[in-house]
Image: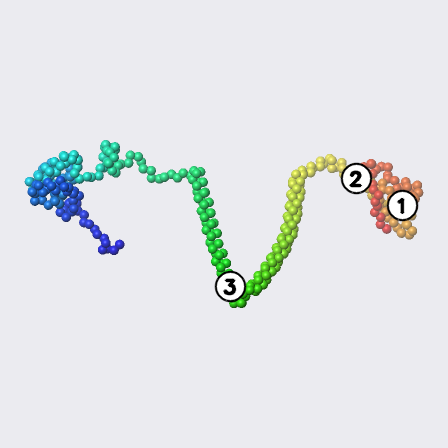
Amino acid sequence: MPKQYIRVQAFSLDHGDNETPDYDLDSEDEAWLSASKLSLPPIDLERMLEQLERYSDHTVVSLNEAKALLKKDDGLTTAVYDYWLAKRLKHGQRLSLAIKADRRDGSSNNDPYVAFRRRTEKMQTRKHRKNDEASYEKMLRLRRDMDRACSLIELLVRREETKSALLDTELRVFQRRWSARDFDASQLQAAAVAAAAAAAAKKSAAAASAAAASSSWQQQHQLNHHQQQHQQSAAHQRGSTAKRARRRPPPLPTPPEVAAAEAAAAAAAPPLFVDDDSLLPGGDNGGRFVWCRRRVGAVYAPAKPLTDAEDSAALPPSGLSPDRLSLASTDAECSA
């Protein structure tokens, strides 16, 4: 604000002669002043009545106190004091109205004209917010409405942009037709047919590429799926084998006496294989030495019928146990 518009009013504790009093003379005061024939300006009378009113808040000042307060001529002070006291007794209240304040003893609580009452209850300085369900639903509805409004605005902007682009395109088409002298729209139709054919070819090429990509993707997906299944089955088999190995109890140790008995029985048993060339007719087989190994108890079918001696030689020894006879088979290992 410019400095020329700033006005500071001087403030003093005492009421000087230049200060305007708060008390205003009424018609009764003016009539008394004119009838009393006192050489007293109206503003001085206002100042004297204001001072008397100010110092007579709860109790009325006496004449001596008024003389000491006003510091005027005794006759003038006595006349003004008598008029002020008579008027105050006539009205039964103060001549200058003042704001009623609350008393400390609390006797003015029922007075409706008392201003600036003291607080009887403690003032709540903070308001607790209620996070209830109704407020939450209102916030949700407000959020939904705001989202809808934003969507509508976006659609409006898109519509206007599309309109502008359409007008731009129509203007350019008109300018090109005017430049090409295409007044019957034949060139425009031919260009539209060519553009449609190009779009169809591009669409078919894109569809074929998408189909090829989809087929390749499906094959790769199936291959990856088979590989994953194979890896899962191999891992499951390894886990099962390891689990079975963990579950298999360790072999029990063989007692010494059992091991000694098994070794003695194996030493006393006859051999499972014997070297014998009696199964073949002729020891040299026409000038060739033939060596044959057969299992004990094995029966072979020779090239010609055997004699009684050869047949008896092919029988197993009588000292073999039945469990040893169970090892006999029809195979033979022969080498010439």
Q: Nearer the viewer, residue 264 or 215?
A: 215
Q: From the image, state whether disc 3 or disc 2 is nearer to you.
A: 3
Q: What residue type is labelled 2?
A: Ala
- Helix or strand or loop: what does disc 3 sit on? helix
The percent coordinates of residue 103 (x first, y second) are 23, 35
Residue 257: numbered disc = none
Crowding near the residue tagged with mark 1, few <14, some 14–19, many ≥20 C-alpha atoms within 10 Å: few
* Residue in view at x 88 percent, y 46 percent: 277
Question: Identity of the amino acid at label 1?
Answer: Pro
Residue at the extreme front: 184
Q: Which numbered mark, 1 or 2, is in the foreground of this view?
A: 1
Calculate the distance from the C-alpha at mark 1 to the C-alpha at mark 2.
Answer: 33 Å
Res. 174 mark: 3
Which residue was labeled with disc 1? 302
Element marked by disc 1: loop
Q: Which badge, 1 or 3, comes first in the chain's sequence?
A: 3
| Residue 68 shows in the view | no
Can you give x and y, in whole percent of width and height, for residue 147 in the image? Answer: 46, 47
Q: CA separation, marks 3 and 2?
A: 118 Å
Mark 3: few/some/many CA within 10 Å (<14, 14-19, 20+): few
Is residue 67 rendered to the left or right of residue 224?
left
Identify the secondary structure beneath mark 2. Answer: helix
Q: Which amino acid, by three-letter code, is at mark 3?
A: Phe
Residue of label 2: 267
Nearer the camera: disc 1 or disc 3: 3
Above or below for 124 versus 185: above
